[in-house]
């Protein structure tokens, strides 16, 4: 009889232990599944599973984490601030000394402060638009995402006098940067950072990067304009260029001077190329490249027997495009030089 009692007691104990472990493992499984939904932005499903973990109430750590995440989802993803306050309040009540309770206390106070101003709906609309921008960016056309970023910036400008304006400024600046709207981001920085010095310091690196992008864009536009001007000049001053070309053709008797100059300059060019780590030598390198190219062609054009036999009109037609290309190439090299050494400007 005693043997059967012991056996029954062991069976009951085993059932109780298995039941405890079953519930414990069930809560752990629910929490992990909830985290998967949380990461994939399936927020309603995550909320449902976190609530089950809280209801089970068999693992204090999981209950604490689930309670905090419920408040966080309602605040930052579903924008139901009354529900967020409820869960934050429950967390502070049940786990007052936890790290998550301290975070919840800060968030709770912020929501209450904004709610007391009567502008919680405005704040919530901005946060919802911000969330929609980040979650939809990769699924919508690039231009549409930029338009959303601009709308958020305008929203921040409109409500810049509210108590939550600093947060709006921070969010809108990051979104403009993220959307590659560097001109508008630079404008936003100038407009708001004087009011919020902390943000100016926080985003110093981003501001420097933005200025660099704007400078690169400006240099690219300038280079295109210069090339356009070069082509225009080659047409406008064709007569002037023709005169120069004829003068060059008539000084064939000075061929020895040209030959010596070409050899000497080629030597300097080779030296500059070997010492091109220094900026001055690199500049000399670029100039030398142009001059050597020009004199190489002049050597062929002035002293080649075929070139000497060309008529005035043929000679002008032959040389004008080449000099125009050399002139245009000089602008390209100048642009490349500026681009290479923008680090001198801290970019």
Image (spheres, rainbow, N blue to C red):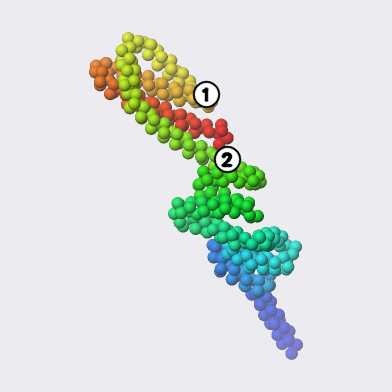
Whether residue 103 is visible to the viewer of this picture, yes or no, is: no
Q: Residues within 10 Å of mark 1 (few under 14, many from 20)?
A: few
Whether tag 2 and tag 1 are in contact, CB under 8 A, the answer is no
The residue identified by callout 2 is 208
Q: Quadrant of residue 55?
A: bottom right
- 17 or 322: nearer the eye? 322
Q: Which mark is residue 228?
A: none
x 72%, y 87%: residue:
4
Q: Quadrant of residue 305?
A: top left
Viewport quadrant of the C terminus: top right
In the rendered image of this protein, does residue 212 appear above or below residue 148?
above
x 67%, y 68%: residue:
86
Residue 202, image x, y percentages: 63, 46
Distance, label 2 to label 1, CA atoms, is: 26 Å
Viewport quadrant of the N terminus: bottom right
The residue identified by callout 1 is 280
x 54%, y 39%: residue:
211
x 71%, y 60%: residue:
102
From the viewer's perspective, is the residue at label 2 or at label 1 nearer? 2
Q: Residues within 10 Å of mark 2 (few under 14, many from 20)?
A: some
- 12 or 251: nearer the eye? 251
Q: The residue tagged with tag 1: helix, strand or loop?
A: helix
């Amino acid at each position: 009889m005693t043997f059967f009692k012991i056996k029954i007691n062991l069976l009951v104990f085993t059932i109780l232990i298995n039941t405890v472990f079953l519930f414990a493992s069930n809560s752990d499984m629910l929490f992990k599944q909830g985290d998967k939904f949380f990461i994939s932005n399936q927020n309603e499903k995550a909320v449902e599973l976190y609530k089950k973990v809280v209801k089970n109430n068999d693992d204090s750590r999981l209950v604490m984490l689930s309670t905090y995440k419920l408040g966080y989802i309602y605040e930052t993803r579903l924008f139901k601030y009354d529900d967020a306050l409820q869960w934050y309040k429950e967390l502070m009540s049940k786990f007052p000394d936890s790290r998550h309770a301290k975070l919840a206390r800060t968030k709770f106070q912020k929501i209450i402060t904004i709610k007391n101003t009567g502008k919680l709906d405005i704040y919530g609309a901005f946060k919802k638009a911000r969330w929609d921008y980040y979650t939809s960016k990769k699924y919508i056309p690039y231009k549409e995402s930029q338009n959303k970023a601009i709308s958020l910036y305008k929203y921040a400008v409109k409500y810049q006098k509210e108590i939550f304006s600093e947060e709006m400024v921070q969010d809108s600046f990051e979104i403009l940067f993220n959307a590659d709207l560097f001109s508008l981001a630079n404008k936003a920085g100038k407009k708001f950072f004087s009011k919020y010095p902390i943000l100016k310091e926080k985003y110093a690196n981003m501001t420097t990067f933005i200025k660099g992008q704007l400078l690169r864009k400006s240099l690219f536009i300038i280079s295109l304009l210069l090339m356009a001007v070069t082509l225009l000049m080659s047409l406008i001053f064709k007569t002037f260029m023709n005169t120069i070309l004829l003068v060059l053709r008539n000084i064939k008797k000075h061929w020895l001077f040209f030959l010596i100059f070409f050899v000497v300059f080629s030597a300097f060019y080779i030296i500059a190329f070997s010492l091109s780590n220094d900026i001055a030598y690199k500049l000399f390198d670029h100039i030398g490249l142009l001059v050597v190219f020009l004199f190489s062609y002049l050597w062929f054009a002035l002293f080649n027997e075929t070139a000497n036999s060309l008529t005035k009109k043929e000679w002008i037609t032959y040389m004008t495009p080449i000099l125009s290309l050399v002139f245009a190439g000089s602008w390209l090299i100048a642009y490349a030089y500026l681009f290479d050494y923008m680090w001198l400007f801290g970019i």
